[in-house]
Image: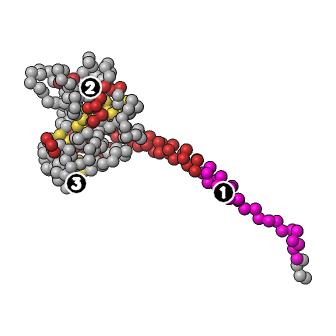
Amino acid sequence: MNALPVSLGDRRPTRAFTLIELLVVIAIIAILAAILFPVFARAREKARQTACLSNLKQIGSAILMYAQDYEESLPLVESGTCGTPDSYGWADLVYPYVKNAQVFDCPSATPRMVQNTALNPPRFRRDRGGTGAGVNNDCTTGAALPADTNYNYGVNSFFAPPNNRDAHGGPFWTVVRSGETVMPNGNFAAIPAPATTVGISEGRGSSPWSLSGGNSAWDFASLDGQVDGRRHMGTGAVDQTSAMNVMFMDGHAKFTNLVSGTRNPGRIWTVRDDD
């Protein structure tokens, strides 16, 4: 038996989206993306900031262990000639207590803290150094490097402001000026307030190891020139909200406001607790 033909009245027309409806959906998706993408980016950077803070905590613990093994002495900032096999810095000295090169590598920083495995033992590369007019050049090739190269971390060796004792400098500042009789820097036991004294911070200065320069850390422009308060802030400018990860000399680490660290009382870049 042949099937009965379907009448034209039983056919239901297929409904499609109109152009206006498609445009509305696309617009909604675009709005949601514009709202959510910055949120995702901030969440990702927050995770990187936390990882960087964890790195500093591990480095702080390593420095404390180093000081215990070497009669309360802090590791040297650097030694040897930049670019030569005898060159090493504080990170090389505390590395055996960490045994993980990635700890010295902040995930938000542009350059990487790379070890030169051709040396025995391996040491972190120094690609910036020199003296005089060549202070910002690659110490191996002599080529000029971009300004404000962001090194991952630097130790606090800010020197004391003019007309102040060297004890008003950072804990890694170990140069004794003429006439200075007491200079506790470089010795952990002589730091009166380690919990409020910065030992290491995220750096962006000319040295791959040390935070120092200008008119010391009591001058905001000098601090900004060495300490990286922009890395996790999503901005290219420094303002009152700028902040960075720092490790204090008791081993704890904290995300700290850049400006507040220079105010008196409460300066965090000096070994003295009475300034």
Q: For numbered disc 3, what is the local secondary structure? A: loop
**Quadrant of the rendering where the C terminus is positioned:** top left
1 vs 3, front mark = 1
On whether residue 10 falls in the magenta region, the answer is yes
Q: Which residue is drawn at 83% across and 68% down?
A: 11
Query: Cα distance, mark 1 to mark 2?
Result: 59 Å
Crowding at label 2, few (<14), some or many (≥20) Cα neighbours within 10 Å?
A: many
Residue type marked 3 = Thr
The residue that disc 2 covers is: 218
Instruction: Tell me whether the residue at label 3 lies in contact with that at label 2, contact meaning CB atoms closer than 8 angstroms.
Output: no
Q: Residue 35 carries which label?
A: none
Tell me the amino acid under the disc marked 2. Answer: Trp
As drawn, the residue found furthest toward the bottom would be: 1
Q: Which of 69 and 120 is in front in this view?
A: 120
Residue behind mark 3: 117
- Is residue 10 something one can see in this rendering? yes
Q: Quadrant of the N terminus?
A: bottom right
* Crowd rating for badge 3 (residues with CA inside 10 Å; few <14, some 14–19, many 20+): few
Q: Residue at x 35, y 30 (%)?
A: 258
Looking at the image, residue 41 sits to the left or right of residue 214; the answer is: right
Q: Nearer the viewer, mark 1 or mark 2?
A: 1
- Give the labeled residue for mark 1: 22
- Counting residues from the start of the chain, the first of labels 1 and 2 encountered is 1
Q: Give the range drawn in magenta.
A: 5-29
